[in-house]
Amino acid sequence: MTSKLLRGRTLSFLRWPEAIDDHSAWRYEEDGGLLIDGGKIIAAGPYAEVARKAGAGIGTIDHRPHLILPGFLDAHVHVPQMQIIASYGAELLDWLNKYTFPEESKFQNAQHGRRIARLFLDEMLRQGTTTVVAYCSVHKSSAEAFFAESHERNMLNIAGKVMMDRNAPEGVLDTPQAGYDDSKALIAEWHGKGRQLYAITPRFAITSSPKQMEMAGALCREHPDLHMQTHLSENHAEIAFTQELYPWSRDYTDVYEHYGLLGRKSLFGHCIHLSEREADALSQSGSVAVFCPTSNLFLGSGLFDYQRYRRREKPLRIAAATDVGGGTNYSMLRTMDEGYKVIALNGEKLNPFQSFWQLTRGNAEALSVADKVGTLDEGTDADIVVLDARATPAMRLRMETVETLAEELFLLQTLGDDRAVREVYVAGRPAKSAIAA
């Protein structure tokens, strides 16, 4: 791969910004440069300095006056649900039975799985998202299709075949042994192939029997370097049903604890209605609570208490995600706009630097991949997004009165969508323009 030099206004985070004027939390260059070679960032800083390191033979791709940031990360997505996004009128359990499970049964057809995987990853790149944590369907072929499409694009993605053996139609069930065997085969084939990472994926306690939960725990013990993803405390009816199915448990989280599924690479979608004991258990194990604001609002599930979870004596590690199709948009900009409103309804605020930290380094840290992506640090993979705060007439008009970087970021978050994404680079290669072509 040939070297390239990007020029623009670069922004990358060093840590959580405590306040809107916590300038030491980020690195911003009004005229910044990124030198990319072999899919990695090999120099970053003021453009003049980086250009000197690059030498005369490397041409500049000039993105001024746009912002250059790390590509966005989305910590919880359901690939098979593209064709049920915007489905009317149900809460979680009814929504699963009415829309989700019938849709996911279509993934018995491997060609359908390949088509949706291709369209899904194209959509992610259009939105500026360069890494996702994906739920495929219960069918082994759906995960194979996702990984094949991801590998072809050289994306760093984390995904797994859903394990579910009860409380769903026959077309979306496996068995404890089949779920284990298929997962083992997928791990052997795909984990660590190129930039692909595998996530052990029991859908949630309701759709996995105790025997299957044991199998998921066995996979986690056998592959301690892998991620584990599932759902937790999204909806009151879900919590009550889980307690019926596991009457010995102290609470919903205790089910996952019992089977050995908590840990630093364990990702729990939603986590809205946690007791203090459950939040302590997640905190002590280093597990990650995944905030899915558009989904939580759309399904009427509740309000994730983001700032309280961060501030509590035993704080939670938090990631943010679209959750499509329970969510309403593929854009992480739209997601953080809704997240801002959820946090406001809890009587708090999230400043724009904190939002963009969460979209980039924050999610990368939560996913344990910040050594690879989520920053513009030298030596990391060149997954990059270029944002245009004047992308629409309304944005251009508002930008006439914008005076600070914080105001510009908040504008992008509040009014931005895929139109604000000018270009996306995956391991240094332009991706959004390639899709458009």
Image: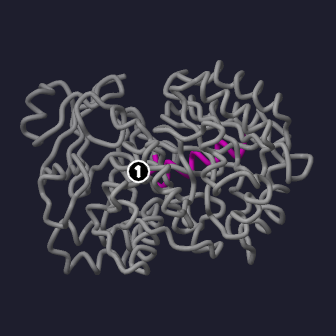
Q: Nearer the viewer, residue 185 or 142?
A: 185
Tell me: residue 173, above or below residue 315. above
Identified at 41% across, 73% down, the residue is: 343
Q: Main secondary structure of the magenta part?
A: helix
Asked if the magenta segment contains residue 117, the reply would be yes
Residue 22 or 435: which is nearer the viewer? 22
Residue count near mark 1 (Cα–Cα under 10 Å), binned few <14, some 14–19, many ≥20: many
Check the image and name the residue furthest to the right.
170
Locate residue 268, reporting x and y percent. Answer: 56, 50
Q: Is residue 97 placed above or below 130 in the rendered structure?
A: below
The stretch in magenta equals 114-129
Q: Nearer the viewer, residue 54 or 324?
A: 324
Residue at 82 percent of width and 33 percent of height: 176
Q: Residue 51 in the image: x percent, y percent?
A: 12, 33
Q: Is residue 408 magenta?
A: no
> In the current view of this chain or complex, which residue is farthest to the top?
188
Q: Secondary structure beneath disc 1?
A: strand
Query: Which residue lies at the image location 60% right of the left edge and 64% below the top edge?
Result: 327
Residue at image point 29% right, 49% down: 69
14 lies above or below 58: below
Q: How is the image coloured?
A: one colour
- Provide residue 284's location: percent of width, then percent of height: 43, 45
Residue 110: image quadrant is: top right
The N terminus appears in which quarter of the rendering?
A: top left
Amino acid type of the residue that numbered disc 1 sits on in the rendered structure = Arg
* Quadrant of residue 235 within the rendered picture: bottom right
Q: Which residue is mark 1?
A: 317
